């Protein structure tokens, strides 16, 4: 039986080494490469021909979300398992919508990651049991359910400016709209993305890579 070829993408070397020991100890898996940034993961994938990429979501250079999108465009048959500490619904929606086959929480037992790798390698989808029945049910198992919520370009710009610290008045002045309109865009976007406050907005901005562009 051909082992599942795994590429590890995480910006912490100690974490990658721990994952390598775990995965290489499995009779049906082998680590074929390691990447410390999202950009490196995208570059290494064609060279190492992995079946599955274990992708840390928060990485320098290119976020795990952006790297997943690029990988799936360049190598549609490669499966991606998102590996993260974030259990936000917006994160799950975005990663699955970008093409990830699995979503695993770093705080979960290693058995969750191994199960996700095996499921992804055979064309399946795996959601960490720690996400809870409500969130897993909300995501569902259909492709339509995995599509991320859509916000308008104006709503996106308002959230981005909010995340980098601009006040409602500053956003209104920059975009040449009223403060009331800013508040409406902000409320609509946060409702669509299930964001409950500024901290959630900042975390979402990090996921999208907006803070690197600020």
Image: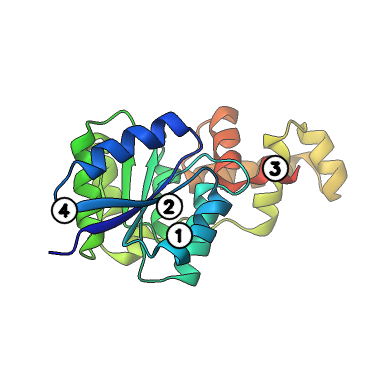
For label 2, count other residues whose C-alpha is less than 10 Å away and answer few (under 14), some (14-19) or many (20+): many
Residue drawn at x 21%, y 44% as measured from the top left: 114
Whichever of callouts 1 and 4 sits on the residue coming sooner in the sequence is 4
Q: Which residue is mark 2?
A: 95
Quadrant position of residue 107: top left
Regarding mark 2 in the picture, which secondary structure is present there?
helix
Q: Which residue is mark 3?
A: 212
Regarding mark 1 in the picture, which secondary structure is present there?
loop
From the viewer's perspective, is residue 71 above or below residue 107? below
Check the picture and name the quadrant holding the N terminus: bottom left
For label 3, count other residues whose C-alpha is less than 10 Å away and answer few (under 14), some (14-19) or many (20+): few
Label 4 or label 3, whichever lies nearer to me, is: 4
Does residue 176 show up?
yes
Q: Which residue is mark 1?
A: 98
Q: Is residue 70 left or right of residue 117?
A: right
Asked if the residue at tag 1 contacts the one at tag 2, i.e. Cβ–Cβ closer than 8 Å, the answer is yes
- Label 2 to label 4: alpha-carbon separation: 26 Å
- Label 1 to label 3: alpha-carbon separation: 20 Å
């Amino acid at each position: 039986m051909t082992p599942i070829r795994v590429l590890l993408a995480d910006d912490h070397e100690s974490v990658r080494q721990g994952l390598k020991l775990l995965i290489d100890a499995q009779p049906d898996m082998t680590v074929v490469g390691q990447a410390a940034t999202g950009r490196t993961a995208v570059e290494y994938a064609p060279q190492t021909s992995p079946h599955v990429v274990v992708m840390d979501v928060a990485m320098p250079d290119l976020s795990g979300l952006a790297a997943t999108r690029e990988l799936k465009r360049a190598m549609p048959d490669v499966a991606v398992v998102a590996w993260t500490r974030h259990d936000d619904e917006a994160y799950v929606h975005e990663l699955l919508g970008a093409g990830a086959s699995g979503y695993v929480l770093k705080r979960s037992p290693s058995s969750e990651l191994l199960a996700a790798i095996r499921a992804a390698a055979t064309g399946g989808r795996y959601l960490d049991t720690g996400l809870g029945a409500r969130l897993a049910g909300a995501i569902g198992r259909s492709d339509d359910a995995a599509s991320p919520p859509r916000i308008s370009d104006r709503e996106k710009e308002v959230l981005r400016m909010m995340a980098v610290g601009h006040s409602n008045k500053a956003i209104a002045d920059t975009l040449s709209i009223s403060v009331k309109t800013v508040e409406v865009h902000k409320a609509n976007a946060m409702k669509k993305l299930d964001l409950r406050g500024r901290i959630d907005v900042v975390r979402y901005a990090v996921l999208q890579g907006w803070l690197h562009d600020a």
